[in-house]
Image: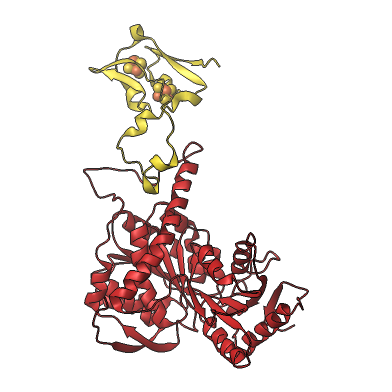
Chain colours: A red, B yellow
Amino acid sequence: MTTEIRKKVLALTGNEAYAYAMKQINPDVVAAYPITPATEIVQIFSKYVADGEVDTEFVPVESEHSAMSACVGASAAGARVMTATASQGLALMHEVLYVASALRLPIVLAEVNRALSAPINIHCDHSDTMGSRDAGWIQIYSENADEAYQSLFIALKIAERANIPAMVTMDGFIVSHGMEPVEILPDEKVRQFLGERKPLYTILDVEHPITIGPLDLTDYFFEHKRGQIEAIKEAKKVIPEVHREYNEFFGKNMPDFFEPYRMEDAEIAVISLGSASGTVREAVDVLREKGEKVGALRMRIFRPFPYEKLREYTGNLKVLSVMDRADSLATIGGPVFNEVRSWLYDLERRPFVMNFVYGLGGRDFFVEDALYIFEKLIKAAKGERPSELIEYVGVRE
Amino acid sequence: MSKLKGWKELAPGAIIEEAGNAVEFKTGDWRTQRPIFYPDKCKHCLFCWLYCPDSSILVEDGKVIGIDYDHCKGCGICVKVCPPKFSALEMVMEEI
Ligand code: SF4
Ligand code: SF4
């Protein structure tokens, strides 16, 4: 059933879109600290608070470590909690990210991807969120402002159903400061879709006093972690379920784990995350014109890692390339490449997998760069395998 | 100690659902010295009860009746605060 919705489209930057979604969510608590390029999100949101447009308890803390700590406390009390950050800010939250996920607190973080220092840089790459890839959070990478806007609602619903925290990301400056049309969903519908949070437990229930975060030594720590791992497995089922509900409710067509493009008969494909994916699709069109069987696969959800879905797309592929906007700094290329390649290893039929690291510190990625990558892949498909599995695209020698 | 639970039996988020269950956790087993209580010397001033950081001085009707060795850590504070005139507590080495 699709619902009749009158469309309202606003020209918003990515940050404005995030803030607008937060206004519509109207969380109980937002605790945050400013950082480029995510500052505007909470700056705009604090205006909503000051103007009485939301009922949120806004906690302007003194650091991101405190921001996430305040979020943990509020979420444990049963509140619907959000925050926003980028880069070094996420790095400073790192310790507390693990606490939030292990305590099963569905905090939602609006993240803007920015390179980690040093050298100090304010532009986009994915090293920040890749750094927290094993913190037990759901990670949704958005390609544009409209998707980031919608993803916050989806993330919140997934998080609160699975009781796992979730971060939505967008590429710093490219999306966060670029203005795009965003289709605004009606306030009432958003509220209806999200409903009320039903917490697993709350510290404010005096009838049933509980202890949160006690010391857990050799006798029980492992069992508790095992339970958390299982909960994340369960979240993998919740993710497509919530996407289905969302698409039905709002008459949308939001892909869950992957967004495939011209993949049906493709023999060569590129996996990418975030804003560069449109550039890759452009290159696919150029090459399809020339009769090349190429396709693009945008990975939207990186955590939990969707290897089951990945395998559904790789059966016919001869060559696959993974584009990473971060490097592991361990001589093995980027993190997405390593996981994709590893999870294809035990298949009878698997493509040859290469890695292209691109766009570090905000370096632009052009259609020519994507075409260059495809050119390499086409050669590899013909048996001309490169001497190196990992290549750095767009860097001066 | 009761049988340890498997991961499927545990509450989500590693919370403890039961209030006050720390008493079930026998924390006295790493003690290297133990206080010995001499009831005949005790004047029940309750200094030891007041000072024991682990609530391990057992008191009934305002009178010390002994020591809770399941939780006593053997810190020796009770022995230190017991007035020398009474010396109703004494530290001895634990036998291993
Ligand atoms: S030795 Fe320490 S812990 Fe044990 S009863 Fe005395 S004061 Fe309490
Ligand atoms: S401090 Fe000594 S005298 Fe006083 S109650 Fe304790 S054991 Fe008895």
Return the residue nearer the eye: A48 or B39. Answer: A48
Could you tell me if residue A52 is visible in this image? no
Q: Which image quadrant: the C terminus of chain B? A: top right
User: Which quarter of the picture shows residue A176?
Assistant: bottom left
Count of all numbered marks drawn on residues in the image: 0
Could you tell me if residue A196 is visible in this image? yes
Return the residue nearer the eye: A148 or A121. Answer: A148
Coordinates of residue A115 in the picture (x, y in percent) = 56, 74
Return the residue nearer the eye: B55 or A201. Answer: A201
Q: Residue at 44% of width from left, 47% of height from top? A: A227
Coordinates of residue A32 in the picture (x, y in percent) = 38, 68
Indicate the quadrant of ligand 1 in the picture: top left
Q: Residue at 24% of width from left, 77% of height from top? A: A187
Q: In this view, does B9 lie to the left or right of A90?
A: left
Q: Residue at 35% of width from left, 77% of height from top? A: A19
Q: In this view, does B68 lie above or below A232?
A: above
